[in-house]
Amino acid sequence: QVQLVESGGGLVQPGGSLRLSCAASGRIFSIHDMGWYRQAPGKQRELVAVSTHDGRTVYADSLLGRFTISRDNAKNTVTLQMNSLKLEDTAVYYCNAEHRDDKEVKWYWGQGTQVTVSS
């Protein structure tokens, strides 16, 4: 079993910055893709950014240039630096990780961290 714990959410004014962190723990064999999704009230969960196992980063088109994902494979952590935040970035942000062992591929979710952008 793998646990994902997020931190770093909060309240910020438009134009401000926040940094989210996610740490994986538990019985880790190999984590492949690791990233962030978000869900705003009344909307579906959507991709924010993913760091793939082969070193690529994938971003939602609308977030390019404002958000940056980084990863530490040795520590099984992923961070999301969010700059120039907008009201529409308000959402619960979820960490996601693809875990692989010799038996199966399984995706795990964190509990979510609230990001509120408000003046």
Image (cartoon, helix red, strand yellow):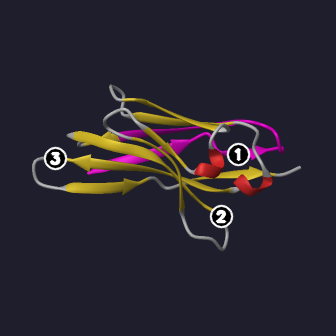
- Label 2, on which residue? 40
57 inside magenta stretch: no
Lower sequence index among marks 1 and 2: 1
Which amino acid lies under the numbered mark 1 shown in the image of this protein? Answer: Gly
Is 3 covered by the magenta stretch? yes
Badge 2 crowding class, 10 Å Cα cut-off, few under 14, some 14 to 19, many 20 or more, is some
Q: Which residues are magenta?
A: 1-24
Question: Residue 20 versus residue 67: which sits nearer the camera?
Answer: 67
Residue behind mark 3: 101
Give amino acid for label 3. Asp
Residue depth check, mark 3 versus mark 1: number of the one nearer the observer: 3
Say which element carries label 2. Answer: loop
Of 5 and 60, nearer the camera is: 60
Tag 1 or tag 3, which sits nearer the N-term? 1
Q: Residues within 10 Å of mark 3 (few under 14, many from 20)?
A: few
The reply to whether callout 1 and callout 2 are in contact (CB within 8 Å) is: no
> On screen, 15 above or below 38?
above
Q: Position of residue 62 (x, y in %)?
A: 65, 51
Labelled disc at residue 10: 1
Q: CA distance from mark 3 to mark 2?
A: 33 Å
Tell me the quarter of the picture where residue 17 sits.
top right
Residue 25 percent across, percent down from the top left: 34, 40
